[in-house]
Image (cartoon, helix red, strand yellow):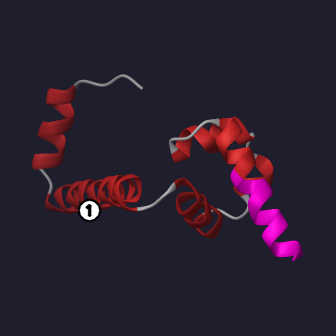
Amino acid sequence: MIFNVRELKHMIMSSESLKKIWIELLENGLRYKIYRENGFLLENAAERYLHFRKLYPELCSRVPQKHIATYLGITPESLSRIRKVMKEEQSE
């Protein structure tokens, strides 16, 4: 997507409703960024995977494991081990 930043900024600043939408988008983006960073700082890989499964249950079966691993900040091999351990724990 290519756009003129100056024109976009002028358009947003010229309308109160666009300002409110823009601020909401920025706030949501910031919330998501903080959530992701906290996950990397406070949770181990298995906990991050559990949260991913809780937030996006339909993606676990539709998205390649390498993409999920990248999103979680781990290698596909590590994700495979985590999934294996979880599967073993469920069968006990």
- The image position of residue 49, as x and y in percent, is 60, 58
Which residue in the protein does label 1 denote? 24
Q: Is residue 12 above or below residue 87?
A: above
Q: Looking at the rendering, in which quadrant would you find the N terminus?
A: top left
Residue at horizontal 15 percent and vertical 54 percent from the top: 15
- The image position of residue 70, as x and y in percent, is 57, 38
Query: Does the stretch in magenta take in 77?
Result: no
- Quadrant of residue 87 in the image? bottom right
Image position of 41 (left or right of 61)? left
- Quadrant of residue 64 in the image? top right
Viewer-nearest residue: 91 or 57: 91
Check disc 1: other Cα within 10 Å, few if <14, some if 14-19, many if 20+: few
Image position of 64 (left or right of 78)? right
Image position of 53 (left or right of 60)? left
The secondary structure that dominates the magenta segment is helix
Viewer-nearest residue: 69 or 5: 69
Most distant residue in the right direction: 91
Numbered marks: total:
1
Q: Say what secondary structure mark 1 lies in.
A: helix
Query: Does the stretch in magenta take in 84?
Result: yes
- The image position of residue 58, as x and y in percent, is 74, 61
Q: Looking at the rendering, in which quadrant would you find the C terminus?
A: bottom right
Q: Please, what is the three-letter code of the amino acid marked with disc 1? A: Glu
Residue at horizontal 79 percent and vertical 55 percent from the top: 84
Image position of 31 (left or right of 6)? right
Residue at horizontal 65 percent and vertical 64 percent from the top: 53
Viewer-nearest residue: 1 or 26: 26
- The image position of residue 13, as x and y in percent, is 10, 48
Residue at horizontal 17 percent and vertical 56 percent from the top: 19
Q: In this view, does 85 lie above or below 9?
A: below
Most distant residue in the bottom direction: 92
Magenta segment boundaries in residue numbering: 82-92
